[in-house]
Image: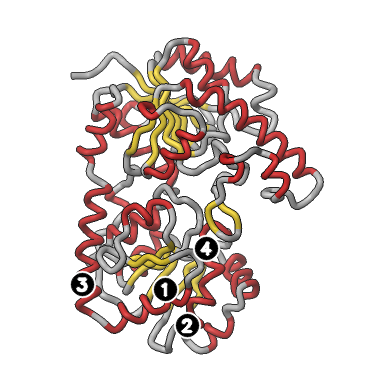
């Protein structure tokens, strides 16, 4: 039966094939499956329109550093959208500090149900990903926001002191607003712990796997390849600065293919992390300009395993779901969702942050043992199905009154 209620979805983005957009798209389909009318309020929507499946699309004024202090235009636009969409539920998805706080405040004043599914730790961390160069960092949450200045988390030039102060004020304001909304959602127990420390009551903290589109996985029958692969980025939280040191402990049987988004980023990595010696000896191949739709999916599906060396408290990266979807053993550090779901030698491989020697041994072990690959591959596939079950997603949403 179709509900009279309508949901206004406020995502980081809604169109395209980036992970944040896909999560928002799947959320919209889930809500429709639950009988709701769905509207989307997003900054990449330029003109109000009716989209696919009768989803109402509304333009959202782009966010900037002053948005939470000069709110008049944002409030006017938002109130118009609330009236036109007849929304009774507000659902934000993605980051929480790149959207005006007035969206939460006004919704609660109107008596609307408000739910936020937050991907990272930007609600307390000015860097958004709660890590430093060594691994997870929760100093601002555990102590005070002076830590952001002390550790110069985002400070590289004088103006960044102003940006840090602005970020801190937003998060202090958020610490009063977020505990007042109806539910916050995440995919890890660890993030729930962060929510609790931020002042959100236990009954409002909901654990729900990250939404994923099964159609993102092409109809490729995975093969046990001879190389390992990583979808690499030049961001400290992604951990690929460890790749060269991992290779130093590997023997010549190991080959890793690192796929970067573009040639410029690939060249920066080669120079910054000293990859050239491993390229020269054939242990490392750098690829660039390879997207999921033009060869990257096949590269993952035909690999021996996927290296995901993230050092932030990950709440599920799409790289993990893509690897598990193709039944690939993953190699990761003991952080975030990896800590909670990966059983070493059972459904993947896990090691302490920075323990590159152990990762090297794990790579060489899997390279030499086809039976081990088949066993872990099977368990990885089971984990994928558990994390991406449509009916379980719906049941979890129904449990919070949707």
Residue drawn at the location 64% of the way across and 75% of the way down: 271
Residue drawn at the location 35% of the way across and 63% of the way down: 297
C-alpha separation, residue under disc 3 versus residue under disc 4: 27 Å
Q: Residues within 10 Å of mark 3 (few under 14, many from 20)?
A: some
Residue linked to disc 2: 249
Residue linked to disc 3: 374
Answer with mark 2 or mark 4, whichever residue precedes in sequence: 4
Between residue 213 and residue 120, name the one nearer to us.
120
Is residue 305 placed above or below 142 in the rendered structure? below
Question: In the rendering, at what x and y percent does residue 119 appear?
Answer: 45, 42
C-alpha separation, residue under disc 1 versus residue under disc 4: 13 Å
Q: Residues within 10 Å of mark 2 (few under 14, many from 20)?
A: some
Q: Residues within 10 Å of mark 1 (few under 14, many from 20)?
A: many
- For the rendered model, the colour scheme is secondary structure
Left/right placement of residue 330 relative to residue 63 reads: left
Question: In the rendering, at what x and y percent does residue 213 appear?
Answer: 31, 47
Q: Is residue 9 visible in this depiction of the protein? A: no
Residue drawn at the location 45% of the way across and 22% of the way down: 181
C-alpha separation, residue under disc 2 versus residue under disc 3: 24 Å
Residue linked to disc 1: 359
C-alpha separation, residue under disc 2 versus residue under disc 4: 17 Å
Residue drawn at the location 26% of the way across and 54% of the way down: 384
Mark 2 and mark 3 residues within 8 Å of each other at the beta carbon: no
- Element assignment for label 1: helix
Between residue 201 and residue 367, name the one nearer to us.
201
Left/right placement of residue 115 relative to residue 74 reads: left
C-alpha separation, residue under disc 1 versus residue under disc 2: 9 Å
Quadrant including the C terminus: top left
């Amino acid at each position: 039966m179709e509900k009279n209620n309508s949901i206004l979805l406020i995502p980081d983005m809604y169109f395209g094939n980036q992970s944040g957009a896909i999560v928002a798209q799947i959320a919209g389909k889930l809500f429709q499956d639950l009988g709701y009318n769905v509207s989307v309020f997003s900054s990449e929507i330029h003109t109000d329109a009716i989209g696919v499946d009768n989803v109402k699309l509304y333009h959202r004024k782009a966010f900037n550093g002053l948005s939470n202090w000069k709110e008049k235009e944002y409030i006017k636009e938002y109130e118009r959208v609330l009236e036109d969409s007849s929304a009774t539920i507000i659902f934000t998805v993605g980051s929480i500090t790149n959207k005006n706080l007035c969206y939460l405040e006004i919704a609660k004043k109107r008596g609307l149900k408000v739910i936020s599914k937050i991907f990272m730790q930007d609600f307390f961390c000015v860097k958004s990903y709660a890590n430093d160069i060594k691994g997870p960092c929760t100093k601002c949450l555990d102590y005070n926001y002076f830590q952001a200045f002390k550790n110069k988390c985002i400070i590289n030039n004088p103006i960044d002191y102003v940006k840090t102060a602005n970020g801190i004020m937003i998060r202090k304001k958020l610490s009063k607003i977020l505990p007042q909304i109806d539910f916050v959602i995440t995919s890890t127990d660890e993030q729930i712990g962060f929510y609790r420390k931020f002042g959100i009551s236990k009954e409002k903290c909901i654990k729900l796997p990250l939404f994923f589109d099964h159609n993102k996985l092409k109809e490729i029958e995975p093969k046990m390849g001879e190389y390992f692969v990583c979808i690499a980025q030049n961001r400290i939280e992604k951990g690929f600065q460890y790749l060269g040191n991992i290779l130093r402990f590997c023997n010549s049987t190991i080959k890793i293919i690192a796929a970067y988004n573009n040639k410029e980023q690939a060249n920066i990595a080669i120079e910054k992390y000293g990859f050239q010696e491993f390229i020269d000896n054939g242990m490392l191949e750098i690829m660039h300009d390879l997207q999921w739709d033009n060869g990257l999916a096949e590269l993952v599906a035909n690999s021996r395993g996927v290296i995901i060396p993230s050092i932030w408290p990950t709440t599920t990266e799409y790289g993990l779901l893509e690897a598990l979807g193709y039944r690939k053993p993953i190699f990761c550090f003991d952080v975030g969702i990896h800590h909670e779901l990966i059983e070493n030698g059972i459904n993947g491989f896990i090691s302490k942050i920075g323990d590159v020697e152990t990762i090297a041994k794990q790579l060489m072990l899997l390279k030499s043992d086809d039976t081990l690959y088949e066993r872990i591959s099977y368990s990885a596939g089971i984990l994928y199905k558990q994390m991406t079950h449509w009916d379980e997603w719906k049941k979890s949403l129904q449990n919070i009154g949707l």
